[in-house]
Image: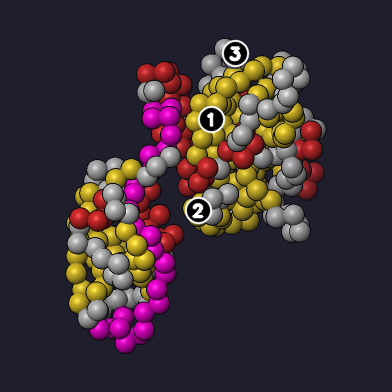
Amino acid sequence: MAGNHSKALQWIQAEKDENLLPSGRYGVGLSGKTDVELLDAYSRAVTAVVDAVGPAVVSISVGGEAPAGNDSEPIGAGSGVLLTPDGYVLTNHHVVSNASRVRLTLTDGTSLGAAPVGSDPPNDLAIIRANGSGLPYAALGDSSTLRVGQLVIAIGNPLGFQSSVSTGVVSATGRGMRSLDRRLIENVIQHTAPLNPGNSGGPLVDSRGRIVGINTAIIPVAQGMGFAVPANTARHVVSQILSYGKVRRGYLGISGRQRQLSRRFARYFNLSRESGVEVVSLDPHGPAIGSGILSGDILVEMNGHPVESVDDLHRLLSGIAVKDVVRIDLLRGTERKTADVEIGEAAA
């Protein structure tokens, strides 16, 4: 699998620090500027971003199985962004899941067939590949540098209106949001650029033309609240899919639930927190079964990092390589024990 996509992976890794727009070209200070000048600078910044990134944004239409002899049934539409000139497109998992047919439309009207490469439901991201070459593409930026109040631009195909642009600001970073499988997506970007059905999978771009997020969800009853998976998460997912065909995640082999600890119990064990993860059951074929961990144990640390919830376990496991050995601190009755576990690989 790695060999098939190695060229695309090189493109994406090489482009991650490049700006599509010259650094500082459209920067404007507030001092001494009139409202007209500031608005003009704002317009120039947005226009330049759309000119640079817009051609790489594609409209995605998907179809499902249909009766024999008929065209495939249309089941949805969304947006995506080309990351390489040979057709690798990043979009949302929910846009292309269960699709038997995928077609892309570029801003110039070109229509291309596409095939799935890999998907990551926990982060609601997917890679598909268009049947084309020499295509326009855009670069993933560094989402860790985003600041609240920063200008962001969403480009996509809301409600079927192709190449639509909306602007807003970053409202918050570091949000947590549940994916379709209820797993927590970390560091989600909340922003005010208006989104509608069809924007899903389209890029969220900063004023220097770098993709800082992939738009993934809105809250229908809310006003001015959109969410995007950060570009740094997307880069990791893309790298894993192009290297292995999927995202490899660590697997501990336990089923657990959050368990509150009394303050007296926390003080007794010198813990700065009041909850851990109680082991409800163990996978009989999983990594933890032979480590000494038992049902009823309460996990409180992994490699020295606090474990207060199942989300904490997922977060820590996402940063640990398969086959690494981790140290688990746990409580059993009135004793504090440790166990070493060689991390396995979660089923796709």
**Residue that numbered label 2 is attached to:** 183
On the image, the x and y values in percent for residue 90 come to: 56, 31
The region drawn magenta spans 242-269
On the image, the x and y values in percent for residue 120 come to: 50, 39
Which is nearer the N-term, disc 3 or disc 2?
Answer: 3
Which is nearer the N-term, disc 1 or disc 2?
Answer: 1
Left or right of residue 19, residue 288 in this image: left
Callout in the foreground (3, 2): 2
Q: Is residue 72 visible?
A: yes
Q: Residue at x 60, y 46 (%)?
A: 228
Amino acid residing under circle 2:
Arg
The CA span between labels 3 and 1 is 15 Å
Amino acid residing under circle 3:
Gly
**Residue that numbered label 1 is attached to:** 127
**Residue that numbered label 3 is attached to:** 132
Left or right of residue 64, residue 282 in this image: left
Which is nearer the N-term, disc 3 or disc 1?
Answer: 1
Tally of marks? 3
Q: Is residue 44 visible?
A: no
Give the quarter of the figure containing the N terminus: top left
